[in-house]
């Protein structure tokens, strides 16, 4: 058992890093009451990490060349599809853009972890967290979000 753990310890570290990075961002989204919370963000980050690990393991197991960039591109395409599904348009308002963007960024963190940079991904996860929390506080302090939305609604009413 110890030999097995030693052989795959690098993979366990990467998966653990994906859980931490996805969890950090997911916790903020959960606290904010967003649909894509802790579980979703952990699974997205871990899933993209696993896809990169697969691209690393294929040549080792089967002895055939593999292009990790191709797998990463497919992850990006798949995540784009999921992100697009989280955007909701109702009349003149659009909801879910931040959620879609967070999903996209969390997948990128997972890819970064998968190629071997878990510490860098953790630093970027903390930067994303700072942006999500900090910009929200700044918007509330400056009353920006409400101002932009109310002006946009006024303009549309004048046009209609």
Image (cartoon, rainbow, N blue to C red):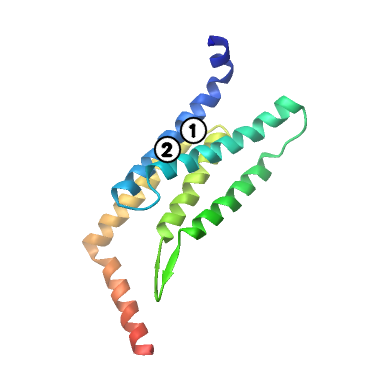
Horizontal placement of 12 versus 157: left or right?
right
> Mark 2 falls on what kind of element?
helix
Instruction: Determine if residue 124 is in view.
Output: no
Coordinates of residue 13 in the picture (x, y in percent): 49, 26
**Mark 1–mark 2 contact, CB under 8 Å?**
yes
Which is nearer the eye, 85 or 141?
Answer: 85
Q: Can you identify the residue that label 2 sits on?
A: 21
Structural crowding at the residue carrying mark 1, measured as other residues with C-alpha within 10 Å and reported as few (<14), some (14–19) or many (≥20): many
Q: Nearer the viewer, mark 1 or mark 2?
A: 2
Q: Say which residue appears at 24% left-offset and 66% top-offset.
A: 143
Q: Say which residue appears at 41% left-offset and 57% top-offset.
A: 98
| Quadrant containing the C terminus in the rendered view | bottom left
What residue occupies the far left of the structure in this picture?
141
Q: Is residue 7 placed above or below 86 in the rendered structure?
A: above
Coordinates of residue 157 in the picture (x, y in percent): 34, 86
Q: CA distance from mark 1 to mark 2?
A: 9 Å
Coordinates of residue 57 in the picture (x, y in percent): 66, 29
Q: Which mark is residue 132?
A: none
Q: Say which residue appears at 51% left-offset and 40% top-offset.
A: 110
Instruction: Determine if residue 83 is in view.
Output: yes
| Lower sequence index among marks 1 and 2 | 2
Q: Can you identify the residue that label 1 sits on?
A: 118
């Amino acid at each position: 058992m110890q030999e097995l753990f030693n052989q795959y310890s690098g993979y366990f570290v990467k998966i653990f890093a994906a859980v931490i990075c996805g969890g950090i961002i997911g916790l903020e989204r959960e606290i904010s009451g967003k649909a894509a919370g802790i579980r979703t963000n952990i699974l997205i980050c871990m899933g993209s990490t696993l896809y990169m690990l697969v691209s690393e393991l294929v040549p080792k197991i089967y002895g055939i060349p593999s292009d990790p960039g191709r797998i990463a591109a497919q992850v990006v395409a798949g995540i784009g599809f999921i992100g697009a599904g989280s955007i909701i348009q109702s009349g003149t308002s659009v909801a879910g853009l931040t959620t879609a963007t967070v999903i996209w960024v969390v997948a990128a963190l997972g890819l970064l972890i998968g190629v071997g940079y878990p510490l860098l991904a953790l630093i970027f996860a903390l930067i994303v967290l700072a942006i999500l929390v900090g910009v929200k506080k700044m918007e509330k302090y400056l009353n920006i979000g409400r101002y932009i939305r109310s002006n946009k609604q006024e303009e549309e009413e004048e046009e209609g």
